[in-house]
Image: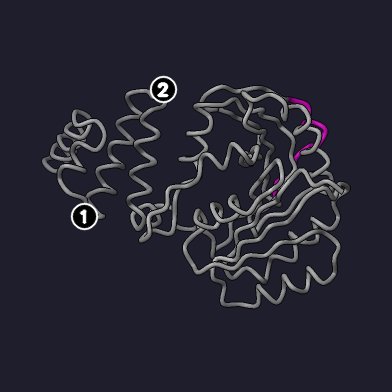
Amino acid sequence: MQKFLTIFTPTYNRAYILPKLYRSLINQSNKKFIWLIVDDGSSDETKDLIMKFQAENLVEIQYIYQENRGKHFAVNNGLRNTKTEFFTVIDSDDFLSDNAVEEMEKLSEKIKNDRQIAGFTFIRFSEKTNFDSEKYGKIEWLVSGRAEYEWEFPGEMIYCFKTEIHQQFMFPEFEDEKFCPESLVFRRIERKFKILFTDKVLAFGDYLEDGLMSNYYQLLIKNPKSSLLNIKERFQDDLSQSEKFYLAKNYWDIASKSGASFTEKFFGINPFLIFKVLMNKLKSKHK
């Protein structure tokens, strides 16, 4: 059976929840995928668990172990080891609807021969979200440039990219940092390619207390090179003055707390906006 898709899962000490994702994969109506797992230095029983899954031989599973370097290093590692035409990241605390791969193959067929389209999206909802499934899965729209989207319930878009395109846009790797915002890479791809957005709800899950998003701002502070680079990327978008000012405040704060040089802090983005940030802080002190 020719596999068109790699479902990639980076994981770190998540043996307690991986079976939920695994069950959703063995229940897929379409099995034309490979489950590629990069274990980012787990110290629990993750490896033994994956070996048990592999022994059941219900889906094709590839397992790679690396020293703990962070999710973005794991994604790059996964991309370097992917041979299928499409690649999507499904986190270890998420799971898929039974028809997810079937729907992804239909979407892949629509775009695979169009070199201007990099991939497609689908929606991930919280497990706790009650929604009318009849309202979703009916809308598709092509987006060129950075996408702005709204929908009725809280959730997020999951991207599925053509592997050969995603491999051209790897995450920057700073040896002393273990986090890089995914939006940095997504923006770079969206500037050069179109994306087929859909309202198909194919994934579910909730952020866990041991997850990356549990203390997002502290992640930015601890990983300043990636964080500041991401803000610079965002400045290339079509932003309002208030949005630019907000980003400038974050830039100054992260750069200051991470010990960046004055030159990097003041001239890293727009020095006029940084000056405005400093003047605003000065005024606040004297109120």
In the picture, the disc for residue 238 is 2
Where's residue 208, x and y in %?
Answer: 58, 60
Label 1 – label 2 distance at C-alpha: 29 Å
Mark 1 lies on a secondary structure that is: loop
277 vs 15, left or right, is left
Picture residue at 79% right of the left edge, 44% below the top: 101
* Residue type beneath disc 1: Gly
* Residue type beneath disc 2: Asp
In the image, the segment drawn in magenta is: 128-139
Residue 249 against residue 111 in the figure, above or below: below
In the picture, the disc for residue 259 is 1
Q: Nearer the viewer, residue 198 or 107?
A: 107
In the picture, the disc for residue 284 is none
| Residue farthest left in this picture | 286
Prevailing secondary structure class for the magenta stretch in the rendered image: loop
Picture residue at 13% right of the left edge, 39% below the top: 282
Where's residue 272, x and y in %?
Answer: 19, 28
